[in-house]
């Protein structure tokens, strides 16, 4: 089940990246070539309509991405014992340092 959610999560991530890269930057054009004003034509979608569609799509994909992230986080912790490290006594806490001190040989005094 986690594999299915993970594959869906990756699809949302790739789609989100694609939609963000397709969007036109706000300040990149510096107000030049702001077309869309006049003369008829009647294209399929205006620049404003395309921007609104991409903005909505980005929001929806972001919400789905966050939702699948939360689902994966909950699923990864399912079935595991929830214990705090503070509840354990010192004898139960595993130690990570098993290194012995390293002998560097005789120390040489530095002349001042």
Image: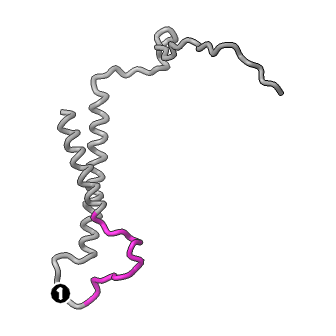
Give yes or no for residue 10 being in the magenta stretch.
no
The residue located at (30%, 66%) in the rendering is 23
Taking 47 as reference, is 18 above or below it? above
Q: Position of residue 59 (x, y in %)?
A: 30, 58
Q: Is residue 85 left or right of residue 23?
A: right
Image quadrant assignment for residue 22: bottom left
Q: Position of residue 82 (x, y in %)?
A: 37, 22
Image quadrant assignment for residue 58: bottom left
The residue closer to the viewer here, 55 or 7, is: 7
The residue closer to the viewer here, 74 or 50, is: 50
Taking 8 as reference, is 19 above or below it? below
**Most distant residue in the right direction:** 112
The residue located at (41%, 72%) in the rendering is 27
**Colour convention:** one colour
Taking 73 as reference, is 91 above or below it? above
**Most distant residue in the bottom direction:** 39
The residue wearing badge 1 is 41
**Mark 1 closeness class: few <14, some 14–19, many ≥20 residues within 10 Å:** few
Magenta-tinted stretch: 22-38
Image quadrant assignment for residue 105: top right
Q: Position of residue 9 (x, y in %)?
A: 24, 44
The residue closer to the viewer here, 42 or 28, is: 28
Q: Quadrant of the N terminus?
A: top left
Q: Secondary structure at mark 1?
A: loop
Taking 11 as reference, is 55 above or below it? below
Q: Is residue 101 left or right of residue 9?
A: right
Q: Is residue 51 left or right of residue 112?
A: left
Give yes or no for residue 24 being in the magenta stretch.
yes
The residue located at (81%, 25%) in the rendering is 111
Q: Main secondary structure of the magenta part?
A: loop
């Amino acid at each position: 089940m986690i594999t299915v959610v993970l594959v869906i999560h990756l699809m949302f991530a790739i789609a989100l990246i694609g939609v963000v890269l397709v969007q036109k930057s706000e300040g990149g054009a510096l107000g030049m070539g702001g077309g869309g004003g006049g003369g008829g034509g009647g294209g399929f979608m205006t620049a404003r309509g395309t921007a609104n569609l991409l903005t909505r799509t980005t929001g929806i994909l972001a919400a789905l991405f966050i939702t699948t992230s939360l689902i994966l986080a909950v699923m990864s912790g399912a079935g595991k014992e929830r214990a705090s490290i503070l509840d354990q006594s010192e004898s139960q806490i595993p130690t990570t340092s098993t290194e012995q001190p390293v002998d560097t040989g005789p120390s040489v005094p530095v002349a001042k």
